[in-house]
Amino acid sequence: MLQLVFVLAAALAAAMPLTTSLKYKIPTAMLKVMLEDDSCISPSGFEIEGFGLFAPGPNNTASPRIDFTFVDVATNINTPCHYNTSSVNVGPAGLTPRWACDNNIVSFIWEDDTVTVIEKACPQDNQPGTVGFEASGSVTPDLTCYKTDTNSTDGDGITCSSNQQEIDAPFTSLQPTPP
Ligand SMILES: *[C@@H]1O[C@H](CO)[C@@H](O)[C@H](O)[C@H]1NC(C)=O
Ligand SMILES: *[C@@H]1O[C@H](CO)[C@@H](O)[C@H](O)[C@H]1NC(C)=O
Ligand SMILES: *[C@@H]1O[C@H](CO)[C@@H](O)[C@H](O)[C@H]1NC(C)=O
């Protein structure tokens, strides 16, 4: 037991230069995973690129849309993310729907004008039957929106795009993946 404490303390010390910039505390179970796998990095931050959405007008049967690119340089993930009417909720039942990005290590929630991105932490270590971890962080993009008319490609509605092409934000939480 004492040995384990020393080992964890050593792991924590080793991880310090990396973790001081983290906006959350790494759970002990996650530290153990990091200890056993040198390639396991706790996600620290991400970038949302080219965020845009379309909301069809009440008489327009076109699909609503959310599109952006998610980038995490540290974990080497760069993936398009989309929501539309054919998107499938990949989240646990009873929670706010989550939409998978093309790389399904990443998913996102759109609620109250805020996009919350969720990245599985060290998915290579998520063995069946063990609890995996996921990092999450949120961005509320500043949007410029305008009305589109029935003659436009999508028909009438509102189309919005982020004023910032690239938005950098930290992950603010690391939690066990909900069952
Ligand atoms: C939607 O269609 C209904 C019935 O045709 C019409 O009365 C209404 O004005 C339309 N609403 C909009 C926003 O175009
Ligand atoms: C609709 O969303 C799915 C993912 O949910 C994506 O694979 C597909 O490319 C999207 N369709 C369009 C037209 O963007
Ligand atoms: C849509 O297109 C039609 C035919 O080209 C045109 O008469 C009409 O004014 C257009 N409506 C709008 C809102 O631009």
Image (tube, rainbow, N blue to C red):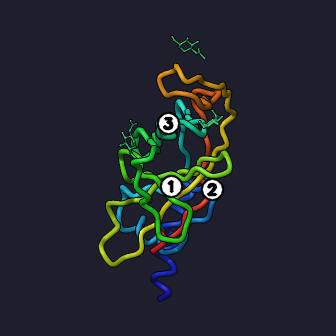
Task: Report whether 56 appears left or right of 142.
Answer: left
The residue most toward the bottom is: 1
Of pointers 1 and 3, the one earlier in the residue sequence: 3
- List the residue tagged with mark 1: 118
Spatial separation of the CA atoms under disc 3 and disc 2 = 20 Å
Q: Which of marks 3 and 2 is nearer the N terminus?
A: 3
Which of the two residues, 61 or 96, is positioned nearer the viewer here? 61
Residue at 52%, 58% in the rendered image: 135
What's the residue type where badge 3 is placed?
A: Phe
> In terms of image quadrants, where is residue 89?
bottom left
Mark in the foreground, 2 or 1: 1
Residue 40 place in picture, x, y as percent = 39, 58
Label 2 CB, ligand 2: below 8 Å?
no
User: Which residue lies at the image location 42% right of the left edge and 60% below the top edge?
Assistant: 90
Give the SS element for disc 3: strand
In terms of secondary structure, where does tag 2 sit? Answer: loop
Q: What residue type is labelled 2?
A: Thr
Q: Mark 2 points at which residue?
A: 172
Q: What is the three-letter code of the residue carrying label 1?
A: Ile
Quarter-of-image position of residue 78? top left
